[in-house]
Amino acid sequence: MSRLSPFNVVSLTLGFVFLYVPMLILVIYSFNASKLVTVWAGLSTKWYGELLSNEAFLDAAWVTLRVAVISSTIATVLGTMAAYVLVRGGRFFGRTLFSGMIYAPLVMPEVITGLSLLLLFIGIGLDRGVLTIVLAHTTFSMCFVSVVVSSRLMTFDRSLEEAALDLGASPLDSFRLVTLPIIAPAVISGWLLAFTLSLDDLVIASFTSGPSATTLPMKIWSSVRLGVSPEINALSTIMIGLVTVGVITASLSTKHAALRAKRDEQAATRAT
Amino acid sequence: MAETVFAPWDDPTAEPIIRFRNVTKRFGTFVAIDDLTLDIYPQEFFALLGPSGCGKTTMMRMLAGFENPTEGSIELAGKDIAGVPANKRAVNMMFQSYALFPHLSIWDNIAFGLRRETSDKAAISARVEEMLKLTRLEKLARRKPHQISGGQRQRVALARSLAKAPKLLLLDEPLGALDAKLREATQFELMDIQEKTGTTFVIVTHDQEEAMTVASRIAVMDEGRIMQVATPDRIYEAPASVYVADFIGDVNILAGTVTATGADTYALTWKDGAAPVTAVSEATFTDGQQAHLAVRPEKVAIHTTKPEDVDNLLKGKVLDIAYLGNLSTYHVELPGGQIIKAQTANTRRLSRRSITWEDPVWVGWTKTAGVLLDT
């Protein structure tokens, strides 16, 4: 184990301070007994209780969850298909245009994406609600999925697909039975990315939602404009907790899988 | 009763299983295969041998169905296979990287192809067990590909490609990833399995020793063309060109002009002022024609004292000695700089060897030892 140089210690400290101090303060204040956010009045979990009895927040959370699950699932299917065509399709007519178009939402300001979607929905006379948010979220998160999946496909050993074809599998079967199971981790992380993006999107949801559907970020934003309440702190703490658990689980399972594969390979080498 | 020699290529009535007819394959402006015609017969173990980029892998991929010829036709068992997709061909391939499916067990890898053509579980199971037994993998059936060694993976790949009992098995550098000892053992195993199953094998390799060991016939390729197709011994002892002679094994080449000195005997003037060397040739040459004499080093004898009655004898001094254990190759420099390699078997222990660096020696060979080539 190498020791850290003073420079590294400083960089590390600065990094952690900038990243985590704001969140830490938020977490601490969510356990504040006082109604005034900035005045500490002892430890309490009462805001968590109040949060659970707040119908408006719960409704918004339910809408957000439904939108996130549906839109990230559709985005994963479409994004994986797009990635497959881009990586495997060879040089077809309009490939450059297609790859440019698919990555455009990555760099497009959200306001513009939101506005253009709003104009589209008004144009085709679609009532704004959960459906329009789902469509909008699918649109912008599918390009993230396709970036993640196509980077995995580029390192994918092409001969595996050829072997499947060679053994008599149809192109569809070779994708379903060989390619998909092998790229599954990338597809899953694409889904998780799309899910997270949808969970915390405020701008696009504001443009495309209607009176019947309010997402959690929209709800938080509108309540904060009336003043920061300790309930919001509690809610945010719960979200931080969920995300932390998710990220740690994901990274631990990948690490575990990698370790196991390495151990198996070493065992195999010794066996010969 | 005399044993019948397996040589369908000499039998005019034999039907080839594969027939390349004037096949050309271009990638853009690059010509990978150049107007190639070739017949391969059932139950052959056929080797495509050549340096990388000579087109041997392209030929194999055209047989498997991953590439289509730009011009010409390829027939498999009498039928043109252009346009038949890879998954509809009675041809299986063993990939260079083995291409084992990492998420499936050894058992499921072998069963993969069988499951595509039948849903009869008992038949699949019986065939997989048979393949496991053939390749001695019974104990590893439940393991995943990353849990077994390189040599075992190679056997799984072979079992998987043989499971569907293809008419033709393609092997793309199958032993490249194995170490020397294991490779040698596996070569004999491959020949054994080929004999047991009676499948036609086409192997692609750049390793000439491997091709010589396993193949019934070898096609030596260069730049998309076949330079020679013949049995290993013909390729080695009667190469058709300087390229083939030089590609297979080690060889001494003397270039010069020939003059006939008998019915089939020629004198080759390889250097002005030096005595010409004589050689017997089946091919005929006209007087004054440019020719090359190719002599294998093991057919060149090295002497410390001038011997009598040797057809060709040249004097030089030892420049280098390559000691290989069982053999030693002496690089003998002739006056004028030409190097002749002479190889001797080390039947005596090293300490009693009589020739060393800078020693004046004679190198000699008989008139039938070499091959006279025009190109």
Image (cartoon, helix red, strand yellow):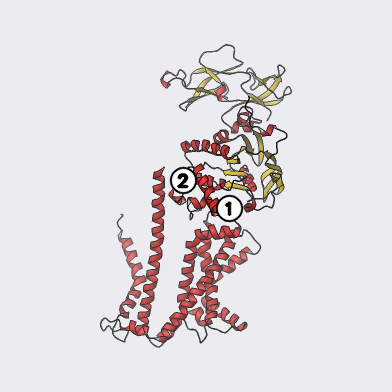
Q: Can you say whether B272 is above or below B204 in the image?
A: above
Extreme-left residue of the structure: A42
Q: Which mark is residue A162?
A: 1
Badge 2: residue crowd in 10 Å (few <14, some 14–19, many ≥20):
some
Residue type marked 2: Glu
The reply to whether discs 1 and 2 touch (Cβ–Cβ < 8 Å) is no
Q: Which mark is residue B221?
A: none
Question: x, y percentage for residue A49?
Answer: 33, 83
Chain letter belonging to callout 2: B
Q: Is residue B7 left or right of residue B329?
A: right
Badge 1: residue crowd in 10 Å (few <14, some 14–19, many ≥20):
many
Under tag 1, what secondary structure?
Answer: helix
Q: Nearer the viewer, residue B59 or B250?
A: B59
Under tag 2, what secondary structure?
Answer: helix
Q: Which residue is mark 2?
A: B138
Q: Report whether residue B100 is seen.
A: no
Q: Residue at x 34, y 68 (%)?
A: A16
Q: CA distance from mark 1 to mark 2?
A: 26 Å
